[in-house]
Image (tube, helix red, strand yellow):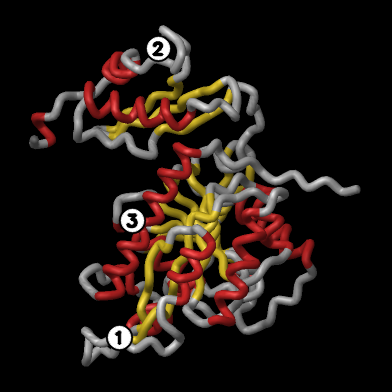
Amino acid sequence: MADSQRKLIVPKDVTDALRTVKYPGSEEDVVKLEMPQEIRIAGQRISFSLVFQKSNDPNIETLVVACEEAIKKYVGAEVEIEDNIAVKFIHDMERPVLPNVKNIIAVASGKGGVGKSTVAVNLAVALANSGAKVGLLDADIFGPSIPKMFGAEGDRPAGIKIDDREMINPLEKYGVKFLSVGFFVDTDSAIIWRGPMASNALKQLISEGNWGELDYLLIDLPPGTSDIHLTLVQSVPVTGAVIVTTPQDVALADVVRGASMFQSKSIDVPVLGLIENMAWFTPAELPENKYYIFGKNGGKNLADKLGLPLLGQIPIVQSIREGGDNGNPIANESESVTGVSFAEVAAAVKHRVHIRNIQMAPTKKVKISRK
């Protein structure tokens, strides 16, 4: 149906559809219980909050799915509703640091040299190419590379005053808003900071960045586990983590430690899955050939062993390195083998985030007590 022929959607259409959704074990529908709130409509895109009394309500997943199905059935099959229902709780009154950011995704690696930042940049671009609103924060404090990969090494973000607060406007390129500590230091000098200084720099970029409305904010973390990781999970509720590895045994051993950190009781951040980078080498002149120079399917096998999804396998091709060096991410080349790979990874990440959001309550900021 052409856009001009589509029926204009109004809030009453949404509430009428949701009146067909009964709370399990009750004769009352979710509208009568005042559960749907903050209904927003933008063309065919519908979003709202579904408010529950308790965070451990066993009906969260069932009701989110039922609401999605009701909207599709009674408002229109073409409406955009998936992952646009935010689960909230009456007693969770803490003011969010990034209230307009739907999902915060940590991009991590067990060790350096696996192409984590390259994956983070191209994943962000691929998500933006899919129509999502995307931000990328370079939290790799001691090795910030995001400015170079976006061709923005000489640029500086501008300040802006909002409600008497001094904020930082992220730069934007290829549909991605991005900030990095690399914009505020001398690129020719080593960054020699103690842990608290690095942590404070990260907090400032998170809280003072004028990110606006985002579907996904990706955080490119330093390799391994460090104070920066703890600072992140204490500062914002992280929706989930994506771990980047290569097929090498030495890289895979470190993935186990990285995954266990996020999944530990004190952190409790879901791991959305693994991305196997440098999965094979394909020469430009022989695009059908695959040479497994770092081992075959190491990331896939480890994902199976850990019970985690494999979000995708990225091959080694010269254009990935060239794109990172000249500020033109390979994900922009949508018809290339690697461009297609990143588009598939982006689709897998979006799917895993959607499943995570209907199966689990929102992540809370970590509170670490000192004894």
Residue 130, given in percent of the width and then of the height, sits at 29, 54
Q: Nearer the viewer, residue 302 or 77?
A: 302
Q: Residue at x 37, y 31 (%)?
A: 65
**Residue 4 visible at all:** yes
The residue sitting at the front extreme is 305
Q: Depth check: 108 or 273 in front?
A: 273
Relative to 153, is 238 above or below?
Answer: above
List the residue tagged with mark 1.
290
**Residue 317 drawn above or below residue 107:** below
Cα distance in 3D space between marks 1 and 3: 24 Å
Alpha carbon separation for disc pair 2 and 1:
55 Å
Residue 176 location (% of width, % of height)? 40, 58
Task: Name the amino acid type tagged 1.
Answer: Lys
Q: Position of residue 96 (x, y in %)?
A: 61, 37
Q: Residue at x 70, y 55 (%)?
A: 231
Q: Which mark is residue 29?
A: 2
Depicted 252 relative to depicted 180: above or below: below
Asked which secondary structure carries label 2, the reply is loop
Query: Where 365 falls versus 323 (above or below)?
Result: above
Question: How far is mark 3 from mark 2, CA to CA?
Answer: 33 Å
Query: N-terminal of the two: label 1 or label 3?
Result: 1
Per the rendering, the mark at residue 308 is none
Q: Nearer the viewer, residue 226 or 281?
A: 281
Which residue is identified by label 3? 347
Dot 3: element: helix
User: Label 2 is placed on what type of residue?
Assistant: Asp
| Residue visible at 59% across and 36% down in the picture | 163
Q: Quadrant for residue 198, please give it.
A: bottom right
**Circle nearer the viewer, 3 or 2:** 2
Of callouts 2 and 1, which one flags the residue occurring earlier in the amino acid sequence?
2
